Amino acid sequence: MPPVQSRDFRLDFFRGVALIFMFIDHIPENILSNFTIQAVQFYDAAEIFIFISGYTAALVYGRTLALQGPSYATARILRRAWQLYVAHIFLFVMFTAEVSYTVMTFNNPMYNDEMRVGDFLGEPHVAIVKALLLQFQPTFLDILPLYILLLAIFPIVLLGLRRQPLMVLLPSFLLYVIVQLTNLSVPAYPEGDVWYFNPLAWQFPFIAGAALSVNGVRASRWRRLQRIALPAAAVIVAVGLVIRFSWTIHGVWDSFPGLFLKELSPINKSNLSAIRLIPFFASVLIVAALVSRDAAFLRWPAAKPWILCGQHSLEIFCLGILLSALGHFVLSEYDSGIVTQLAVNLAGVLAMCLIARMIDWYKTMERVAMGERSGKPVREKRITP
């Protein structure tokens, strides 16, 4: 039986950071987006979220596979995929209602095109079927379909990683390379559109995270890797920071030069361009080397809200999507001044943290009640994939 490991709060913390950054970045022309990860690196919160999701999925379901076999592990994975699917459909309905209400209230049809819900209002009988098939993906509603699809194939991936990791990693990487060379994509609705998060490319960081979780790195090999790769990773991250931050300053102050802006821009996010992926993996290596499982800052009171958001990622993600759309409407229709922007951001982040705290309290009380009924001690919270 594999040993019981204590919860790794690094996963919760950085996933919580990714969720908060997603909320901020999803508000167009938001001043605080100049202070998130996408302002200083070529990648953003999406890579963090998908990589950690792959890591935690392998961590949770790998233990289930070891203890209870492949059939039960597969059932649990598919059950989680179904939960995500139901949450996505619920979010789709709420988001479409939110946008439609705003369009009618303020008589501003611009939001139909901006939020990509115009096709739903034009032919709802077709759009709703396409939404159920995950082919219709309005703005902000494109990462959950990716996650659902990745979980749907994860039973096979997990079995392969447990037996022959390279037999999974190599085809995954090869598929990623093919996408970069051929621009291969997955069609979406309406006709001519493609999945914004191309699953043929984005599967690679998810599977890479899962492979790292399942197989890990031996201590001796990790020390050698740090000596050899850590300096190179630091250079990659530093160069990315200088170039990308120059773009951010250029966007605010036009006379400031954006380094290599014409040569490198635009950077393809849909297909996860290598210029995004390489700095991301370099950052993962640096964080893994510098932030230990028992890092002191993870026990700080200030870190608790971020950790709770990461622990209840599905609920907080859905809430963040609705709040970012609401924040966009408020800034567009009433006032887009800096004070209002800061107030909208603060209100949204506080709402996400408070809801995460309420969910955590409820689930804790539920575990206590179950423990009292069964006469067993309350167990530590499970990591949610």
Image: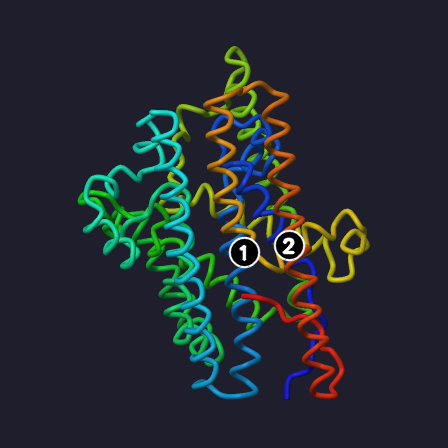
Q: Are marks 2 and 1 in contact (CB under 8 Å)?
A: yes
Give the side of residue 182 with respect to residue 378, left or right: left
At x 32%, y 47%, the residue is 137
**As rendered, which of 145 and 98 lies closer to the eye?**
98
Give the side of residue 259 with respect to residue 241, left or right: left
- Tell me which colouring the rendered structure shows: rainbow
**As rendered, which of 168 and 52 lies closer to the eye?**
52
Could you tell me residue 156's position as x and y percent? 39, 76
- Number of other residues with Cα within 10 Å of mark 2, as a class: few under 14, some 14 to 19, many 20 or more: many
Q: Secondary structure at mark 2?
A: helix
Could you tell me residue 51's position as x and y percent? 52, 57
**Which quadrant is the C terminus positioned in?**
bottom right
**As rendered, which of 79 and 169 lies closer to the eye?**
79
Could you tell me residue 87's position as x and y percent? 44, 59
Q: Sequence order check: which comes first, mark 2 or mark 1?
A: 1
- Number of other residues with Cα within 10 Å of mark 1, as a class: few under 14, some 14 to 19, many 20 or more: some
Q: Height in image: 135 above or below 113?
A: below
Q: How far is disc 2 from disc 1 in space, using C-alphas?
A: 8 Å
Give the side of residue 91 with respect to residue 303, left or right: left
Q: Secondary structure at mark 1?
A: helix
Label placed on residue 49: none
The residue labelled by disc 1 is: 315
The residue labelled by disc 2 is: 356
Residue 227 visible, this orientation = no
At x 63%, y 71%, the residue is 382
**As rendered, which of 309 and 89 lies closer to the eye?**
89
At x 42%, y 45%, the residue is 274
The amino acid beneath tag 2 is Ala
